[in-house]
């Protein structure tokens, strides 16, 4: 991925997830190293509020609409209002949570409970592969038909340029 090609192959996506995994590991190690100093109520609130505001409303709306479409026998190309994407992206932003941590520290001082923020965000990215959500994709993970076509065309183009072995690599995500 670069500034002219804003997509990832399966391999580059796993490498990015591994980087977040290292951040998750560091945050968890620090958290457990200072377990006796963690204030649990702030830690749990900081961990949960990201999804309570940023994920659950959109997921509820998506699944309710998806179930309704299915029950009506309609295609399940469920679209939900963009506000849910904005809520998700704002709440799951390292910038937003970093600013919150800075405000917290300026008001009440540093505390180990703040590690709940990077643990949540790094965990979402490393374990679940959840990144910020563009408006053009489903709120819940579904392969977009345009991406499916692109992946096939990109794999075929790579096979022509690099030969038969690369075609296999593209199909298996081992670029």
Image: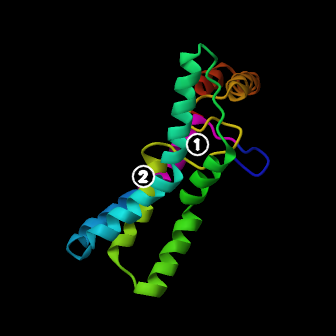
- At 76% from the left and 52% from the top, the residue drawn is 3
Provide residue 41's location: percent of width, then percent of height: 29, 68
Is 20 displayed left or right of 93 in the figure? Answer: left
- On residue 128, which mark appears? none
- On residue 12, which mark appears? 1
Is residue 20 highlighted in magenta? yes
Mark yes or no: residue 30 visible: no
- As measured in the structure, the alpha-carbon distance from the residue carrying label 2 to the one carrying label 1 is 18 Å
* Whether residue 163 is situated above or below residue 106 in the rendered picture: above
Within 10 Å of disc 1 (Cα), the crowding (few <14, some 14-19, many 20+) is: some
Query: In the image as oriented, which residue stretches furthest toward the top?
Result: 73
Residue toward you, 12 or 103: 103
- At 64% from the left and 53% from the top, the residue drawn is 86
Provide residue 167's location: percent of width, then percent of height: 65, 22
Provide residue 165's location: percent of width, then percent of height: 62, 22
Task: Give yes or no for contact between labels 2 and 1 (Cβ–Cβ under 8 Å).
Answer: no
Q: Main secondary structure of the magenta part?
A: helix
- At 35% from the left and 78% from the top, the residue drawn is 111
């Amino acid at each position: 991925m670069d500034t002219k090609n804003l997509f990832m192959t399966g391999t580059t996506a796993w490498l990015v997830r591994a980087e977040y995994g290292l951040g998750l590991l560091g945050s968890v190690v620090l958290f457990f190293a200072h377990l006796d100093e963690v204030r649990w109520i702030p830690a749990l609130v900081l961990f949960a509020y990201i999804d309570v505001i940023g994920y659950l409303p959109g997921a509820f709306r998506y699944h309710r609409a998806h179930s309704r479409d299915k029950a009506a026998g309609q295609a399940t190309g469920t679209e939900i209002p963009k506000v849910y994407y904005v809520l998700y992206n704002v709440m799951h932003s390292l910038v937003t949570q970093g600013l919150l941590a800075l405000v917290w520290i300026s008001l009440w001082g540093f505390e180990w409970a703040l590690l709940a923020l990077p643990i949540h965000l790094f965990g979402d990215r490393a374990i679940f592969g959840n990144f910020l959500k563009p408006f053009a994709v489903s709120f819940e993970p579904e392969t977009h038909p345009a991406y499916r076509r692109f992946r096939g065309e990109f794999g075929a183009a790579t096979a022509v340029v690099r030969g038969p072995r690369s075609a296999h690599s593209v199909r298996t995500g081992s670029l």
